[in-house]
Image (cartoon, helix red, strand yellow):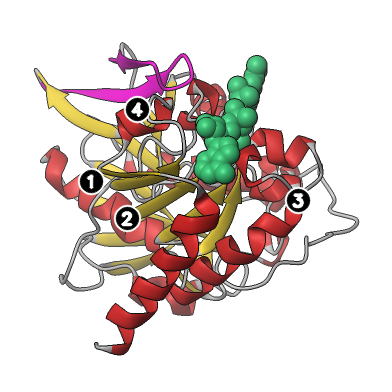
Amino acid sequence: MANGVLILAELMDGKIAAVTQELVGAAQRLGAGPVSAMLLGSGVEGAASGVTGVEKTYVVDDAALAEYTTDGFTNAAAAVVALADPAIILLGQTNAGRDLGPALSFKLGTAVAMDTTSLEMKDGKLHTTRPAYGGNARAVNGFTSTPAIATVRPKSQDAAEGGSAGVVEKVAFDASGIRTKVVARNVAASEGVRLEDADTVVTGGRGLGGPEGFADIEALAKELGGAVGASRAVADLGWRPVGEQVGLTGKVVSPTLYIAVAVSGASQHMAGCSGSKNIVAINKDPDANIFKASRFGIVGDYKTVLPAFLAAVKKVRAEG
Ligand SMILES: Cc1cc2nc3c(=O)[nH]c(=O)nc-3n(C[C@H](O)[C@H](O)[C@H](O)COP(=O)(O)OP(=O)(O)OC[C@H]3O[C@@H](n4cnc5c(N)ncnc54)[C@H](O)[C@@H]3O)c2cc1C
């Protein structure tokens, strides 16, 4: 009988990605049986020991998995599922997870809940919660099929700490079923910390008045070791690249600190940042929607507030 939780371990620059230990933490807290991991790719076996707090890590290490392809990773994951027989499968809401989740659920004839931010067991079954209608409502889903699959938003879960690596079990799979061939990979140039991974995000809105208004935003993000974000209005105006857009049609971020400067806080924007642990807003309009979601708010012209804010941050950091 299906039992336990299987999570997808992912690599970032050859090391186990942070989201992996977040999934292990979520799986442990569910208390739904043994927690195991699957690590899929080429030349990945050595990284398996980086997954801790699991009983077993299933590894599919095959040259055919050097590049992510939907059919390759779905077939490899299905081979692991056939062995592990989990009741629940958790994946990150990452590039791989958001593609693999639906494909795997289709292959296994089961259901997937996407972009979940909280998980719990009710009457022995997984229930997931995710933001809906642009973050204005929360959808709670249960499952009538097994295994229950969910993708989990990065940074929405506390990572498992400690614990030792699980037993590594190599799993063979048939690569002949892969019909996709990757012919090129174009990586967007980016500097510093990735927006999705940043623990601090400083976002600028249309109220900055132009691209030059981002000089202080960049300076503050750099000082805090964070990333720069933008509202859609800003991206549409071409002041910042679309890759920096936060929101319903942009990126979803859940940093510890989200600083929104001259951003009105439209619901479509909040859909991308409402999972932030602390929102700080600077806006000259005291009735701006962003203040409703903010832990701290400063009402004022950013041209006055931001330089003082930056100076204060520098002073505090210099004082250690
Ligand atoms: C289908 C759909 C999808 C969308 N997806 C997204 C999305 O992914 N992300 C997104 O951001 N938006 C999205 N939008 C657009 C969204 O509705 C808003 O139009 C957009 O977020 C507004 O951007 P803004 O807050 O930068 O600009 P504005 O709404 O123009 O707000 C500017 C703010 O700056 C303040 N301000 C002005 N001058 C100053 C100053 N000197 N100092 C301090 N504050 C100042 C103003 O008080 C105001 O609150 C979407 C809309 C639709 C319909």
Taking depth in this image into account, of 138 and 293 the one nearest to the observer is: 293
Dot 3: element: loop
Q: Amino acid at mark 3?
A: Pro
Viewer-nearest of discs 2 and 4: 2
Q: Amino acid at mark 1?
A: Ala
Quadrant for the N terminus, please.
top left
Disc 2 from disc 3: Cα separation: 23 Å
Question: Of label 3 and label 4, which has the lower sequence position?
Answer: 4
Direction right: furthest residue: 183
Residue range (magenta) = 124-142
Residue under label 2, please give it. Answer: 256
Please tell me the numbered disc located at residue 26.
1
Magenta stretch: helix, strand or loop mostly: strand
Question: Of label 2 and label 4, which has the lower sequence position?
Answer: 4
Please tell me the numbered disc located at residue 147.
4
Question: Of label 1 and label 2, which has the lower sequence position?
Answer: 1
Disc 1 from disc 2: Cα separation: 18 Å
Q: Position of residue 64 (x, y in %)?
A: 72, 60
Disc 1 from disc 4: Cα separation: 16 Å
Q: Residues within 10 Å of mark 1 (few under 14, many from 20)?
A: many
**Can residue 136 be seen at all in this image of the molecule?**
yes
Q: Amino acid at mark 4?
A: Pro
In the rendered view, does 15 fall on the left or right side of 143? right
Dot 2: element: loop
| 208 up-or-down from 197: above or below | above
Dot 1: element: helix
